[in-house]
Structure formats: C-alpha cells, structure tokens
Image: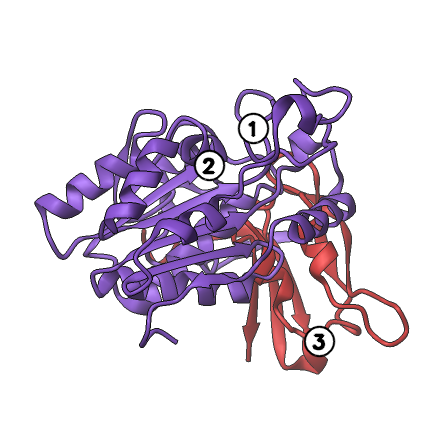
Chain colours: A purple, B red
C-alpha cells in the first residue's frame, strides 16, 4: 500500500536528489554506473574537487544527475574539455563520462592521445554495444551477430570489422607507471565500485585512469529483465572483465 | 529540502526476521525489474521479491518483498539504477 514516508531515499550527496527520477529509460545501466560513481566520490571526499563532463548520446542525460560541477560538451570532445579543465586548474579531479560512440567512434582520436600523454583525468566509458539515444544502431562495440536497427541480420564481421576493444587498446599505449586501465560490468555493482574507487584514487594522485563499463540497454536490445542479464553475461565472455594496468602502490 | 518533506512509497516492516524495514519510493521506481533478477534465491528456490499491485512513476508495476522470506541483504537496493529501494536496519 502506498503511504507517505518521512525517511528520504538513500541517495549519495554527490548525486543531485532534487531532480527525482532520472531521465534514463527503465533499466538503463547509466543509472547504476553514475550512482556507483557518486558513492565513490562521497567515499573519497572528492565532491569539491571533481568536475564532471558528459558527452552527447544517452550519457548527456546525466547533465543534472550529479551534484558536482558539470559541463556538457560536443560529441566526442569530452576528453579534451576535461583535460583542459584539469590543466588550467591543477588538483581538479576531472571525470569524462561518455558512451561507446563518444569514446571509440567520434572521440577515439582524443582517447588515444589523452592515453598516450597520460593526462590527469578519469575516462569513464559506458559500453552498451549500440547507439541508444538514436534508436539502437550499430556502434563500434556491437558484438558479432548482434541484431540492431542497422544490422537487421546480425553484425557481419566480414563487412563491418571486428568489435572495438577499448580497454585493451588503451592498456597497450599507456604509461604503466601512472595509469589505471580496467574493464568492469554493471552485473557486479560491488566490484564496479571497487574499480571506480581505484580509478579515482589514481586520478586524485595525479595519474590517468580509463574504465570501460559493460552496460545494459533493455529498450534497444528489446529484452526483458531476465534476457538483459543473459546478454550482459554473453558480453562479459566476449569483452574480458579485469584490471589491465594497475600502477604500483594502488591496491 | 525541508525536514518535513514526505515521500510517496511502500513500506514493508519486519524483513530479515524483524531486524530491518524495506522501503520503495514509487516516485523513483520505473518498473525495470532488475532488482527481481538480483534478488537471491533461497534453498527452496524462492525469491522474496515479486511484482507489486502498486505502480511506479511510469504506471508500471513496482516490486514488493515477502517479509517472511526476505533476508534484508540489500541486493535490490544496490542494483536499483534509480535508488528507489532502501533497506534500513533497525
């Protein structure tokens, strides 16, 4: 029975509780990732130092999600905007939040160069294997055989190439002494929080962090709650979930 | 945010053998059902969470636990993308 409760919902202080329900679709993985990020920011006490940048795509709906300084940038340009902020104001904890389109398609050049230079920032890439906001078209990370709007017979790797593996690519070009590169998943929220904590700790110490999170998109995958986690399990087989590069001294 | 603010929701008292209370805020619940998947199964193959007769913000069914089975683990609250569930230990 619905009644009026005096106990407020459990929302971290780095998350904006004034907006009520977020703009994301029901069951969207963005909510799980951003909630975990907000808890980690709270835990490390970085709310005053953090600057959050969001990309175009579904990830832009996070523009009022966080209770930290937020900038919404052009498509794929979140990475240079955020490292611009951290270069202009050293000590800032820059967080660039993007989807697989913003990170591995249009923003891939910035991802590569920021990784090679080891900019002091966290790049948080949400991989849901399609372009969610425009209706679920094929993205660089669409899995072989996956049916999307633009691949109605399943992705054919002979004509479209193999899926991009962002974390492996970044791990192969970063400076291992001060970089943290990992892939995580929303199916294990406790582990996701632990990974984000390592990543943000590394950024607060002046390093570069890249975390790719395997996420879910029930509306565009056209899956119910059971099949959503089933497909996420298939993604975890294809995209290896582990810490690729961990700097010394970071446990 | 005033202290007198009240939130519409479902309260289930006495989960985890009376050691905790379970809250769901219907203005936040979108009815995605991810919590139902993460709800752990006990030895008899039962899950405590099931669809509720109440509806969430998009007029889709919310969820509700069976207080006799619920162990108050908080997996639903951890998974909920919209922080709609809260398990408060007494």
Q: To which residue does mark 2 refer?
A: A99
Left or right of residue A97: residue A49:
left
Identify the chain of the residue marked 2, using the numbered disc in the image: A
Report, in whole angstroms, how far the alpha carbon at label 3 lies from the one at label 2: 36 Å
Residue A8: % across, % down: 45, 58
Mark 1 or mark 2, earlier in chain: 2
The number of numbered discs placed on residues in the rendered structure image is: 3
Residue A64: % across, % down: 35, 38
Q: Estimate how packed mark 3 is, as few (under 14), some (14 to 19) or many (20 or more) residues with alpha carbons within 10 Å.
A: some
Identify the chain of the residue marked 1, using the numbered disc in the image: A
Q: To which residue does mark 3 refer?
A: B71
SS assignment at label 3: loop
Residue farthest toward the right in the current orientation of the protein: B44
Mark 1 against mark 3, which lies toward the viewer? 1
Tags 1 and 2 touching, CB below 8 Å:
yes
Residue A184: % across, % down: 53, 56
Mark 1 against mark 2, which lies toward the viewer? 1
Left or right of residue A113: residue B68:
right
Q: To which residue does mark 1 refer?
A: A139
């Amino acid at each position: 029975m619905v009644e009026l409760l005096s106990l407020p919902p459990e929302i971290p202080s780095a998350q904006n509780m004034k907006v009520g329900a977020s703009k994301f679709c029901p069951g969207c993985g963005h909510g799980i990732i951003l909630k975990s990020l907000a808890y980690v920011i709270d835990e490390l006490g970085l709310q005053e130092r953090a600057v959050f940048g969001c990309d175009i795509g579904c990830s832009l709906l996070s523009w009022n999600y966080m209770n930290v300084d937020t900038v919404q940038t052009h498509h794929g340009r979140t990475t240079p905007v955020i490292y611009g902020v951290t270069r202009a104001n050293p000590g800032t904890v820059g967080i660039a939040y993007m989807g697989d389109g913003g990170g591995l398609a249009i923003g891939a050049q910035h991802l590569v160069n920021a990784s090679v230079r080891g900019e002091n920032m966290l790049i948080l890439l949400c991989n849901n294997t399609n372009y969610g906001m425009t209706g679920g078209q094929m993205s660089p990370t669409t899995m072989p055989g996956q049916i999307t709007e633009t691949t109605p017979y399943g992705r054919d790797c002979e004509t479209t190439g193999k899926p991009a593996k962002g974390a492996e690519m970044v791990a192969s070009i970063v400076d291992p002494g001060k970089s943290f590169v990992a892939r995580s998943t929303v199916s294990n929220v406790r582990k996701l929080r632990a990974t984000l904590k390592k990543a943000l700790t590394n950024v607060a110490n002046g390093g570069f962090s890249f975390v790719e999170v395997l996420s879910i998109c029930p509306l565009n995958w056209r899956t119910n709650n059971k099949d959503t986690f089933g497909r996420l399990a298939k993604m975890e087989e294809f995209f290896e979930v582990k810490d690729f590069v961990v700097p010394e001294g970071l446990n | 945010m005033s202290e007198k603010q009240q939130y519409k929701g479902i309260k289930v008292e006495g989960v985890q053998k009376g050691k905790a209370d379970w809250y769901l805020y219907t203005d936040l619940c979108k009815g995605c059902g991810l919590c139902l998947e993460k709800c752990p199964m006990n030895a008899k193959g039962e899950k405590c969470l099931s669809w509720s007769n109440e509806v969430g913000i998009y007029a889709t069914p919310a969820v509700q636990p069976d207080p006799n089975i619920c162990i108050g683990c908080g997996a639903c609250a951890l998974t909920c993308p919209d922080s709609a569930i809260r398990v408060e230990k007494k």
